[in-house]
Amino acid sequence: MRCTELLIFVSLLAACASPDSKIVALSPDIVVAPGEVDFGPVVKLYSETAAVQILNTGRGVLDIDSIALEVAGGYDDIFSVSELVEETKIAPGEATEVEVTFTPKNYVDYRARLLINSDDEDQPVLSVPLDGAGVVGSTPDINLSVNSVDFGTVATGETATGYFTIENVGDGDLNIDALELEAGPFSLVTDPSGQTIAGGGEFTVIVEYSPDDDEEGHTTDVVVLSSDPDEPSVSVVLLGGNGGDYQDPIAHIDCDALSGVTPPRTIVMDGRLSEDPEDIDDVHELTYEWELIGRPELSRTYFANPGQETPELFIDVAGVYEIQLVVTDFNGISSEPVTCVADITPDEQLYIALSWDIGDSDLDLHLVPGGNAFWGCMDCFFCNPVPAWPAAWGLPIYALDNTYGYGPENINVKDPGDQSYYIRVHYFANHGGGAANATVSVYVNRTLYGTYTKELSGSRKRWDVGYVTFDGPCTDESCDFTFTVEDEVTDRGSSACPDC
């Protein structure tokens, strides 16, 4: 009897367990909208913001581990992303949003990716492409005539007057939104709030100081809020009484870092000797603002980390560089700017550099010894960066290559010999950039001989710039040479790299 009951129970279990039954896992499924963000053309220094929604279309909770930016070309400060506005866990059918901001600082095409890391097994890392371009437009640029206004010692009940000037050194209208000043012994006599200052114009702000207490000194800020795209808020420090003894910080650049530099090379600038006389106990840090205020026509370099004590700068081509440093103390008082100016010259006797004026294009520099073929084994170019020239022709090197636009590219020849060297520019690939104005600079024996510019309408065009002919080897004092300008544009497609 007991065996029969057991058999019936087993049979019932077998009948209930259908061979088609299965357990469905509650898995998350990440989706983003939009799938890519194209900011399009944005006027330099202005910002555009786009929202990216992160949706969970699955049946399980979606866990966002991290969101990061990967920016091409080292332009890390051009794109920024907000933090998640909700929890990093997204329930099924729910969504959260992040904002991506694009602020171009040069006339360049920029590319980046938003990388979203989650526990979606099918897409653990979801990539959202980001694109944008900096373009020319009318831009205001605010400048204050002074960092501080010192009224000196004023007796209680008396009034002293000071002033500063708000200047618009840009070419677009500057809207003054407001001037903020805390109530106290300082007051505004003239207030440009709500006014517009045209490009090249200015407004003088008059301030009064009327101490009415027994304090020995007073200090406060006037904050100017405006439509300047990269400095929407600037301030002037007002000093009265003992505040009149305030000592501004002092910026210092070790200009020796530029001595003997030859391109291309990365240098480290040093501002560590800058001083803060007000920080007697040495407990506060200065803030640093490095700026490349002048560079050669063919240069495309910039400070990648301008807020550091010792930032790096890539010296990409020969020419004159002007570097500026301003330091600011813990009270927001800025130093007078200091500068270093250096004329960077090549070490080689023949130096050629190329840059062009558009992105999404690949132009290449070639240097061909006389009697040899363009795109051949003796041609010094990206396929053959160190061709095996006879020793009597000198030592060539293709030092810089750029495939995305603007350049620079650079070829150097150390100890050129009794030979002619033909300079060629080839429009290798047009990725949508269109016509390009190519510019070539030629240095002979460390001195700029000439700069030449030509428009190339598109890919498959070759510009024969000219050729340098040396009459024997160069000495430390001079080179006997002639430069022959050709300035001809012909059709020439690309080839496979030669098997050398």
Image (cartoon, helix red, strand yellow):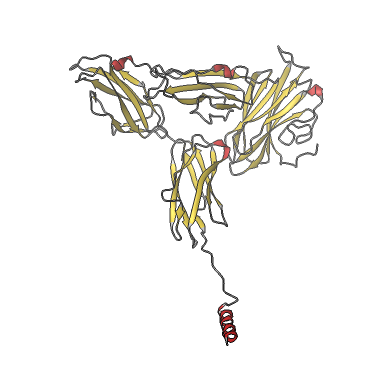
Q: Is residue 277 left or right of residue 455?
A: left
Residue 499: percent from left, percent from top: 80, 39
Q: Is residue 189 left or right of residue 370?
A: left
Farthest left residue in view: 157
- Residue 316 image-quadrant placement: top right
In which quadrant of the rendered image does the C terminus lie? top right
Q: How many marks?
A: 0
Residue 497: percent from left, percent from top: 75, 40
Q: Is residue 408 left or right of residue 222?
A: right
When the figure is inspected, residue 370 is found, relative to residue 245, above or below; the finding is below
Q: Which of these two is toward me, 306 or 121? A: 121
Q: Is residue 421 left or right of residue 49?
A: right
Residue 30: percent from left, percent from top: 51, 56
Farthest bottom residue in view: 1
Q: Which of these two is toward me, 415 or 231? A: 231
When the figure is inspected, residue 233 is found, relative to residue 111, above or below; the finding is above
Residue 88: percent from left, percent from top: 46, 51
Instruction: Residue at 45%, 61% (x, y): give it.
Output: 93
In which quadrant of the rendered image does the N terminus lie? bottom right
Farthest front residue in view: 2
